[in-house]
Image (cartoon, coloured by chain):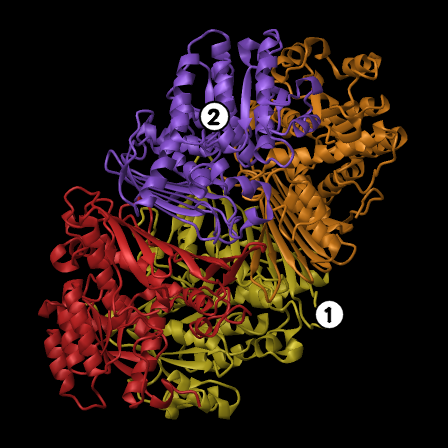
Chain colours: A purple, B orange, C yellow, D red
Amino acid sequence: MDTTNGSLNRKLRMALVGGGSGSFIGRVHATAAVLDNRAALVAGALSSDPVRAKSSAAGYDIPLDRAYASYQELIESELAKPATERIDFLTIATPNHMHFPVAKAAVEAGFNVVCDKPMTFDLAQAEELQKLVEKSGVVFAVTHNYTGYPLVRLAREMVQNGELGEIQCIRSNYIQGWLRTRLEASDQKQAAWRTDPTRSGAAGCFGDIGTHAYNLGRYISGLLPKQISCHLRTFETGRALDDYGHAVIQFENGALGTVTASQVTHGRENDVTIEVDGTKGAIQWRQENPNELIVRRNGSAHQIYTRDPNAPYFLPLAKSSCRLPSGHPEAFFEAFANIYRAAFDAMILRIEGKSFETKNTIYPNVYDGVEGMYFIQQSVASSRENGAWLPLQHQAARK
Amino acid sequence: MDTTNGSLNRKLRMALVGGGSGSFIGRVHATAAVLDNRAALVAGALSSDPVRAKSSAAGYDIPLDRAYASYQELIESELAKPATERIDFLTIATPNHMHFPVAKAAVEAGFNVVCDKPMTFDLAQAEELQKLVEKSGVVFAVTHNYTGYPLVRLAREMVQNGELGEIQCIRSNYIQGWLRTRLEASDQKQAAWRTDPTRSGAAGCFGDIGTHAYNLGRYISGLLPKQISCHLRTFETGRALDDYGHAVIQFENGALGTVTASQVTHGRENDVTIEVDGTKGAIQWRQENPNELIVRRNGSAHQIYTRDPNAPYFLPLAKSSCRLPSGHPEAFFEAFANIYRAAFDAMILRIEGKSFETKNTIYPNVYDGVEGMYFIQQSVASSRENGAWLPLQHQAARK
Amino acid sequence: MDTTNGSLNRKLRMALVGGGSGSFIGRVHATAAVLDNRAALVAGALSSDPVRAKSSAAGYDIPLDRAYASYQELIESELAKPATERIDFLTIATPNHMHFPVAKAAVEAGFNVVCDKPMTFDLAQAEELQKLVEKSGVVFAVTHNYTGYPLVRLAREMVQNGELGEIQCIRSNYIQGWLRTRLEASDQKQAAWRTDPTRSGAAGCFGDIGTHAYNLGRYISGLLPKQISCHLRTFETGRALDDYGHAVIQFENGALGTVTASQVTHGRENDVTIEVDGTKGAIQWRQENPNELIVRRNGSAHQIYTRDPNAPYFLPLAKSSCRLPSGHPEAFFEAFANIYRAAFDAMILRIEGKSFETKNTIYPNVYDGVEGMYFIQQSVASSRENGAWLPLQHQAARK
Amino acid sequence: MDTTNGSLNRKLRMALVGGGSGSFIGRVHATAAVLDNRAALVAGALSSDPVRAKSSAAGYDIPLDRAYASYQELIESELAKPATERIDFLTIATPNHMHFPVAKAAVEAGFNVVCDKPMTFDLAQAEELQKLVEKSGVVFAVTHNYTGYPLVRLAREMVQNGELGEIQCIRSNYIQGWLRTRLEASDQKQAAWRTDPTRSGAAGCFGDIGTHAYNLGRYISGLLPKQISCHLRTFETGRALDDYGHAVIQFENGALGTVTASQVTHGRENDVTIEVDGTKGAIQWRQENPNELIVRRNGSAHQIYTRDPNAPYFLPLAKSSCRLPSGHPEAFFEAFANIYRAAFDAMILRIEGKSFETKNTIYPNVYDGVEGMYFIQQSVASSRENGAWLPLQHQAARK
């Protein structure tokens, strides 16, 4: 018999930290987490402002008695509940500087965590968090959500299958235009914290979206990085952080990668593109048209692989990441939900006392989060030295 | 304070009829209806096979005591519940021939209904259903889901605003390839009932997808039809219904429309396209790339309107049909959910005893359902007379 | 040794009738004919106005003594020249009503002819011309230039090879917008004669571009037509001919075709598209992106065949129609030149006294021209009878 | 009266050096130069092999008495002819290492020159050639042919007009796949010399196509370069030159540019793309779809500017670079011919003894050629120092 969450036979209980009115990503998490009817949002600490934390609850259908004034209260109160009511996991959708304290408290309390990216404010926090997760044994996912698209996963599987041969070049771009003007000057909420070094971290554009582009190449290729040379720029006068950046990455196997990120290119929306070249084939993907993967091999026609779970070229992980038949487009929410889906599988194993993979997970995990923070740190450092090559190898990196 | 369903301040309670294992569209309804956290699926009669009806319930997280063996039992039992527990609406996701009996029973019991398309088995049933709905006063939506895409709604608003001038030509195509072979011969469930006249109705391809293409043109243009000349074909030998069809439509204002539908075009997935030409501008849209609307006017560059709720060209209905900022693609589920969203607004007004629009609704309604059945009937009849012009005016039609 | 025109070892001598200042298509012919250095433009009767006929010559580098005041003078004078100087062929690029008299005179004089489309003013002229050509034995080509694109030719070869199986559906569209306003009222030269029944013929849009769309489907599929049902419209008030039209075509083998042509769709330029569905595969092509052919087969990825003469999928005729390696786009002139190239091959055989194919030629010929005129005649007649089915079989038609 | 080459009233006489059988680019030059009927190919030294030099002549319709055995013989013999017969210009289409000696001889003899790129074998030759050209006063064009596309020229005009504001970012890619295998090992002619340091120069991929990508960005933006950091790679084992490369360029105004070139990306044909970001707008162009330019500005729909000479957005140079109305695609030959067209205008002025622009020319000139060689030299040098920043300012550079 097919039941919700299989042997667990119930929905997982979710708490949301962040996501109060004006938030963008909180609502995305709340929608994605429940898309498959495998979880229910039952508690929240939706804002650092206690009044707004309460008043935002009804919009999420969170009962008032579980609409907490702070994340500390949330954790304490939920721990006090019987296991049959207590939340199973906590999602962190706050500005960056709050990721670590919330995650630390949740992990130490034994709650599974889904954390937005970048994982922490700096590398030191990230490395500490890694140790805490290893110690506590919780499931910890980081929402590098673009890895949730079925065709991105197919690309990764193709690489792992050897269909593209050895990977030699990666070109990864993330181009936006919304910060072409200094929106932060008019106090637009999204712009304000993302361009503020005290809330966003050492990097602006490269922390917000460059990390996604870098992670995407790493996820698909599995190549281990060796060195980085980076050039960050702030093109809008008066802005406190970078709004454009470019990095060259040398991988251990000799491959060459580039990452370009922009927030100042007129008219571009959320244009994540990646090209990966191997000795046997090359692929190309664009987030704004996510149901297609272009696959090319010399001597053959250009091939457009669509998100067709029944196609002969579809591989198991990509197939299990689909909800609809081909031609019925899936998009951003579903990709986001695929991160949750994989994390849920691990959470259930943990709840049932079974062992589960923690490093080579389908979902981006705490190790990927550490690597992301290292990428940001070394990007900023290299850029300060005018693009000097700096190491990018980190023990946390996985293939 | 922002609450779930506003003044109602609670989720709507949903029952699902159909959707048992092997179903495609049942799962779509269940996902779309709850996407905005405004409804919860609490009851179901998931299959005409009582055993499967029960066994499918856990997969939807429906409690066993509300997993009914038949739609009759569902309606009877739910009516017997106190108003605070009773379902608010019932979704019909069965094969076509069962739409009418279920809808009739639900409407007569006073339940709001969301019904898949085509609305009934034939026109007589549709016209009877219209009367029943008018009598009972329930909210009745038909899921011509392609009208839920924000850019389709924008197109309709542009027409209503006069931005395209008078509409003179509509070219609407719905091209698939999955029935290129006789899948029904191997008893594939989706193919089996869709190609069976006793379950699908008088038309195959034209009933299943031709109606969508026709409805889409009607929705965007608001033009009233006058006459139809139609040519249906069955290209796969041994198939009992049409698998290809083409209709020419004469509109009352003198406009000329064409509708082409195919289930036998190799490699095409779910390729709904529409072009609408007006005296002041012309638009083009494709379902497989739904976040773009191409707008053209002589003397200007080709314009790609994207699903950008903050764009100056975005109009109110399109804007309220978005969940994500531009560049973060939305797709099939969200469009489907937009039909529900509009129907929910009407249901809440009804629950609260307020008046609500029943004819010129945002969501496709019982009148559109009637018109769809008339379109099928006249298509089949015209085709039998080798494309003779037959009337297509129906009192139910709305602009 | 590779020489110009092989065994002939010299360029062919060309005369141009029409093409005076303000002409569009005359310059296209002059450019395309010499693109491969196989012909030289040496004489002309460039305008029906004798003064302009002379004054336009220098722009084509035609010596003044061969810039004739009329086509009659041209033919007479050239006939009087020694064979070593005399023109080999004559290109007709006048408005439609002059095609026949010029062609008749040229054919009777024994000159090879390249004639723009539609071939004549009406069917009677076309049938008479066919007889004259058969009697004289000249090479006669009609510039249905879209058949000259390498990927269109590849499509035809694929059909002939059986790669697409039996052809069952053809959807052919030719969409323009330039006549959305009544340009003819402001005496714009191109618009003026094309909308004038005394110079253009019985049809406007359908004669000018509908014939191209029809011919393209016939060329690729080789299917023989049986009947036509057509609907022509004039959407711009005051216009004397149709500016929009749609035809349904029944082919002898049971296939169903549609042809849609528009001159009034805002912002569309020269948008010829065709889709051909067979039992084994389906193809799609668009003139504005002519170096790609989309090929689809159920169970495979969508394939983009590019104009790559070295690709394994390229077939001989398509290959011999290329001048550049893949990725170096070819376009309108080259396709036009491919019509000339094939006609030149036949002219050389004739000059050398060898036999040459006259019916199943690579280039569109007098029989295709006859069929085009029959298509126009029957389209107009059917439209006058509100889309009545009329025969479309003509003895001239070839596979 | 409109005459060939206006006041000159005759065709220009052209000689071709290189282009013997097996050549690709020689035929391109021969076709492009005569496309507008403004020049005739009358002489040639088509191969370094005297026998092949003769035997290739007939294929170009060059009379045997002007089919010279060497470029030296060509120059000497043509100088000896009367001015009314003598060639006006000489096109160099040999492998790279022969460009300089031929160009030097031609320039010193006072012949105008059209030279393929890269202009010479190394920078020293280029700088010497610049001096020779300055001394002799001949017209000297270098076929960076991608600057000939009308929409590339429109982009340049838009920048010059200030429509894009200040340019801050350039992303220029040139991606091919044909050298994914070591074609040179099988002695394929094109591959053999391009991968041979004694014939190609210091760089392989970056010399052959990287220079084009760099030049394209420079042409459109007019930004002056300051420094370069480059990384070249040879991914095919045993190859003697780079087959992949990436450069970061710092411009004097603070803008950041990147150039990526590949010959080893499976399935990519001749994929030149460029994106230019300014403070007021951003543009995107792709050579394989050359009739479109995407123009974006925050707050507006994405705009597709097509090659429409009558569009309000078209500017004078772009307009004068068109031969066909919109929707009738132009492509590679026409762009190439536009380089010739601009050079012809200068040649005629020189022939008529008038002054003509030599530095800020429409066509790429000897100064651009020098800069291209400097780009190659500094790319190779920077790459050898692991991407060290090296100067890229050269006195020859123009805006």
Q: Nearer the viewer, residue D358 or B374?
A: D358
Give the residue type at disc 2: Phe
Q: Chain of mark 1?
A: C
The answer to whether marks 2 and 1 sit on the same chain is no
Can you identify the residue that label 2 sits on? A100
Q: Is residue A243 left or right of residue B294?
A: left
Q: Position of residue C358 (x, y in %)?
A: 40, 65
Q: Is residue A70 left or right of residue D242?
A: right
Residue D30 versus residue B219 in the image, above or below: below
Q: Residues within 10 Å of mark 1 (few under 14, many from 20)?
A: few
Residue C343 versus residue C398 in the image, above or below: below
Q: CA distance from mark 2 to mark 1?
A: 70 Å
Q: Residues within 10 Å of mark 2 (few under 14, many from 20)?
A: many
Q: Which mark is residue B84?
A: none
Q: Say if residue A290 shows up in the picture.
A: yes
Q: Residue at x 18, y 73 (%)?
A: D129
Q: Position of residue D30 (x, y in %)?
A: 27, 71
Can you identify the residue that label 1 sits on? C237
Q: Nearer the viewer, residue A203 or B383?
A: A203
Q: Quadrant of residue B319?
A: top right
Q: Indicate the secondary structure of the residue bearing disc 2.
A: helix
